[in-house]
Image: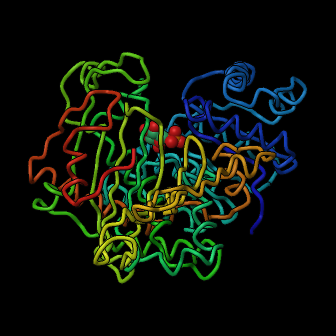
Amino acid sequence: MTDKSTTLILFGATGDLAHRMIFPSLYHLLCDGLLPEPFHILASGRTEMDDAAFHATIREALGTYAQAELLDEDRIATFFGMIGYCPVSAGDAAQFAALAERARALGDRPMAFYLSTPPSLFAPTAQGLAAAGLVGPATRIAMEKPIGQDLASSRAVNDAIGDLFSESRIFRVDHYLGKETVQNLLALRFANRLFEPLWNASAIDHVQITVAETVGLEGRVSYYDGVGALKDMVQNHVLQILSIIAMEPPARMDSTAVRDEKVKVLRSLRPMDAETVRTHSVRGQYRDGAVKGKLVSGYAEELGHPSDTETFVALKAHIDNWRWTGVPFYLRTGKCMPERQSEILIQFKPVSHSIFGRNGRGGDVEPNRLIIRLQPDENIRLALMAKRPGLDRGGVKLEQVELDVSLAHAFAGERRRIAYERLLLDFLEGDTTLFVRRDEVEAQWAWIDSITRSWTDAEQKVVHYAAGTWGPSAGIALIERDGASWHD
Ligand code: BG6
C-alpha cells in the first residue's frame, strides 16, 4: 500500500456514470469515515457552472442513487464542502491552468485523476494535466473502459498515458472487478480445498458464462451503435470473469501475482478465423418484443435506421493450455433478455462408471453442476445426485438435489456496497489488484480483434431475436450442437 491521494480530480463529472455511481460511492465512503482527511474533489466537465449549481446536480443524484438511509443534510453539506467545480475542455490550456491553480490552492498533496470521459479524451486530458504541471511521481490516474476500440487504438492510449504515468500508477477500471461477487470467485476457488483437484479438463466438461441484461439501449445509442455487445461486454467484463475462473492459483493475493495469472489465460485464448467464427460465434440484434411484460421496440427502430451492431453475442471459446485442453467455454451476453442474470456454470463430467444402471450406464445419474450466480442475487448452487426416498422395489431412484448457499443470507448483516466504493478506495490508496493491467487489456483486445476481423472476412451479419427472449435460435444451436444446453 502506498501514499493516499487526498485530492481527487474527476473528469466527466457531469456525466451519467459520475451521477449514478461515482458521487454516490464517494458519499457512502464519507458516511463510513473511509475518505482520507482532509479530502477534496475537483469536479470537472465541459459545461460552465459554479460550485453551487454543480452541488445542486449532485444533490439530485444523491437523492436518486445514494442509499436513502444514509442521506443526511449535515453530512451532505460536509460532502459539498469538499467539492469544487472547474469547467475544463480537453485542449483548453487556460482552463487546465485554472484547474491547476485551484488544485494547488488546496495544498501540495498527492493527487489522483479519474477520467470518466470518452476514451478519445484520455490522452489529451492527461497531456493537459501534465502541461499544467499537475503530473508528478506521486500522482495516479484512473480510466473507465473502453481503453480503445481495438488492439491498435488501445496501444496508442496506453502509450500516451504510459509516457506520463508509470504502470503502477495507472488504474484501468472494469467495474465488474469491484463487485463483491466477482471477488468472491477468488475466495471460492482458492480458499476451499474442495474444488482445485477437480478444476481442470479431467473433471470438467464445459463452462458457461452468461451476462444477461433486461435493459436495452437506454439512450446510449450514440455510444453503442458500431460498438456492440462483443466490445461493450465481452472484451472486458466477460473476459475478466473468464480469466478468474480459468487462472492458475496465484502465489499471493497481490496485484502482480493475480494479474500475472489472469494475463496467461487471456493470452491462451485461441484466436478465431473466418472458418471458426461461423460455428463458434453468433451475433444477434433484438427486434420488437416484450421484456417483463413491457413492450420494447426493436434496436433498429430505437436507432432510427437499420444497423449491423450486435446486441447479443454467443461464443464458444477455447483456452489452449494444459488445464483446459478440450474444455469449451461458452460465453453469452445480451440486451433485452427475459431476466437480468449473470452466472457461471461449471458442468462436470459424468461419473466414470454408474453402479445404478446396467453395464455401467443409465440409472439416471446426472453429472454434477456448480452454478455461481453473480447477480441479481448472489448464490452458489451445487447440483448433486441423491437417492429418492422409497423402498426401491423397482431399483434405486436417483434425483438431482441442490446444495444452495445464499450469500445474501449467509452475510445478512453486511451492507452491500456499490462496486465503485471498493474501486475508488483502492484507487485513492494505490492498490492496483482489482484494476486491469496493460498486458491484460491488450491480450483481451488481441482475441476480440481476431473475432471482429473474422466477422468481416466471413461477412457474418446479425440475426434477429425478439426482445424478451434468450437470443436468436442460432445462439441455442451453438451449444446444443455439442450436446449441452444453456442454463437459463
Ligand atoms: C457497462 C456496459 O460496462 O456494463 C453496459 O457498457 C452494461 O452496456 C453495464 O449495461 C452492465 O453493468 P452491470 O453492473 O449493470 O451488470
Q: From the image, which quarter does the C terminus lie in?
A: top left
Q: Position of residue 467 (x, y in %)?
A: 32, 27
Depth check: 453 or 242 in front? 242
Q: Residue furthest front?
A: 393
Q: Residue placed at 55% from the left, 74% from the top?
A: 195
Q: How is the image coloured?
A: rainbow
The residue that appears at 30% across and 20% down in the rendered structure is 302
Instruction: Check the image and name the residue furthest to the top.
Output: 295
Q: Quadrant of the N terminus?
A: bottom right
Q: Residue at x 52, y 62 (%)?
A: 386
Which sits in the foreground, 373 or 483?
483
Position of 329 relative to 343 (above/below): below
What is the quadrant of residue 54 in the picture? top right
Task: Name the side, left or right, on which 94 lies relative to 290.
Answer: right
Horizontal side of residue 429 vs 16, given as left or right: right
- Vertical position of residue 102 compared to residue 382: above or below: above
163 and 271: which one is in front? 271
* Viewer can see residue 116: no
Q: How many marks?
A: 0
The answer to whether residue 86 is left or right of residue 345 is right
Q: Nearer the viewer, residue 400 or 287?
A: 400
What x and y, as percent, mark residue 23? 69, 35
* Position of residue 152 measured from the top left corner of the image (x, y, whole percent): 30, 59
Q: Position of residue 187 (x, y in %)?
A: 64, 67
Q: Is residue 459 visible?
A: yes
Which residue sits at x=39%, y=65%? 365
Where 274 sits versus 232, above or below? below
